[in-house]
Amino acid sequence: MTTDALRLGFRSFMAGFPTGVAIITTVDTDGTPRGMTCSSLCSVTLAPPTLLACLRTGSPTLAAVLRRGVFAVNLVHGEARATAELFASGAQDRFARVRWQAETGGPHLPDDAHAVADCAVRRAEPVGDHHVVFGEVLRIAGSEATDPLLYGMRRYARLPTEVGS
């Protein structure tokens, strides 16, 4: 299998694994808010509470996260698809187009997130064209895992409500 064929096959393989949608945010050292949509997020351990997020190398958000050493993980709810798309677009004015609050780890998106974790960077490892950033969770705001936005098969969807048992 050629390298290109393997990449395409891997991309299709991972598209078949739906995941939740998060927006990673921070504030750069000059005060500029930074953020990007992220679907590569998972828990690592409960003691200490740690998660990992995979952020694209070269991203201004990754650079700011590494400079500041803190970030916020905004778990996006099912009504916030437009915001997820906005933060995935690279639009320079994204923070001017959403309501946000400055917090410990980074901007919280109160209209678009059902829960937010403020994290401290404990480690970052380059892997291919991304960095795996390990964040120790310092604080959680909200925790209702209600109607999360999902991403899979290259499209957004809401978690279906189960009918019957």
Image (spheres, rainbow, N blue to C red):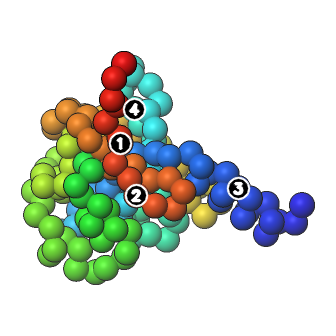
Mark 3 sits on what residue? 10
Mark 1 sits on what residue? 159
Q: Residues within 10 Å of mark 4 (few under 14, many from 20)?
A: some
- Say whether residue 137 is visible: yes
Q: CA distance from mark 2 to mark 1?
A: 10 Å
Report whether 62 appears left or right of 131: left
The residue at 22%/67% (across/down) is 33
Look at the numbered discs 1 and 4 and tell me whether their residues touch, using CB distance below 8 Å. Answer: no
The residue at 13%/55% (across/down) is 111
Q: CA distance from mark 3 to mark 2?
A: 19 Å
**Which amino acid, by three-letter code, is at mark 1?**
Leu
Q: Where is residue 105 drawn, in percent x and y?
A: 23, 48
Q: CA distance from mark 4 to mark 2?
A: 26 Å
Q: CA distance from mark 1 to mark 3?
A: 24 Å
Reading the chain from its start, which is encountered first: label 3 or label 2? 3
Mark 2 sits on what residue? 156
Q: CA distance from mark 1 to mark 4?
A: 25 Å
**Which amino acid, by three-letter code, is at mark 4?**
Thr
